Amino acid sequence: MRIDILTLFPDMCEAVLGDSIIGRARVSGAVEIHCHNIRDYTTDKHGRVDDAPYGGGMGMIMSVQPIYDCYRALFDDCSEKPHVIYMSPKGKTFDQKKAIELSGREHIVLLCGHYEGIDQRVLDEIVDEEISIGDYVLTGGEMAAVVVTDAVCRMLPGVLSDEICFTEESHFSGLLEYPQYTRPAEWHGKKVPDVLLSGHHKNIEKWRREQALLTTIEKRPEMLKNAELTKADKKFLESIEYSE
Ligand code: ADE
């Protein structure tokens, strides 16, 4: 998969995406990520990339020309139109389902805004969807682009060491993850649940699933409506007399 980030602050994105698991995935070739500086494409002799809003008002608006030329330059090394996403608090809220969907695409472009926004005409011309990472306003789209890139990349083959890492984790099957423990078996008087020390894999699996259900009920009960529940899950919920 290839991800291109169009931004005025490529170093901000590189600082995060050049390190740790995603940094290693780039080196191994599991994913190709490029951060482009929109300013490199401006034709303004003073290097400007923004201007005052028509109709008046506060702040500056990012101009069409450098963004469009930065986007068009991608076509020098790819023939198909990539899926273009504008990082914006007006977008649909990002979630694990969207991360899985985007990880199935060949090529996405994440466009980061700054200042008071981007001239609507270039958005209308190149953007396929808008994504928000939550109901709050950031100073720019970079941190949102990094969040989306991280969540998408970790779903790609060869990025995490073992597929089990994400098939059992929070949100994957619509439930939150069960609690995890490691050595020592007792700490500050708190013991690791006996079943985890039993070596009985079937019982461990059952306990973990039930704990995932209980954790979800406690922390995010609204998630249960859309979770993929098995017959055993429903039986367990009945046994604890759970009702929405
Ligand atoms: N840009 C500014 N705020 C944002 C948000 N919440 N999500 C995505 N992009 C943004």
Image: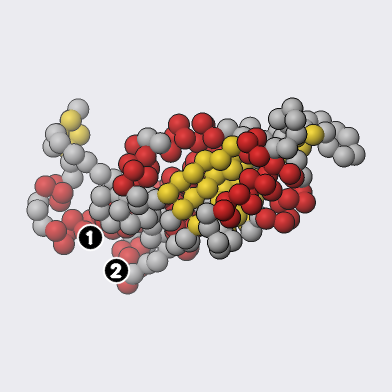
Q: Is residue 99 left or right of residue 133?
A: left
Left or right of 20 on screen, residue 79: right
Instruction: Provide residue 83's location: percent of width, then percent of height.
Output: 57, 58
Residue 78 position in % (x across, y down): 53, 57
**Residue at 58 percent of width and 32 percent of height:** 9
Which three-letter amino acid code belongs to the residue tagged 2?
A: Ala
Residue 158 position in % (x across, y down): 30, 53
Residue named by callout 2: 232
Under mark 1, the amino acid is Lys
Residue at the outermost bottom position: 231
Residue drawn at the location 54% of the way across and 44% of the way down: 5
Q: CA distance from mark 1 to mark 2?
A: 9 Å
Give the camera-side residue of 239 and 202.
Answer: 202
User: What SS does tag 2 mark?
Assistant: helix
Q: Quadrant of residue 210?
A: bottom left
**Left or right: 218 as drawn, with respect to 47:** left
Quarter placement of the N terminus:
bottom left
Is the Cβ of the residue at disc 1 closer than 8 Å to that at disc 2?
Answer: yes
Picture coordinates of residue 146 (x, y %)?
49, 41
Picture layout, residue 147 above or below residue 190: below
Badge 1 local density, few (<14 within 10 Å), some, or many (20+)?
A: some
Q: Earlier in the sequence, mark 1 or mark 2?
A: 1
Outermost residue, right side: 55
Residue 53 visible in the picture: yes
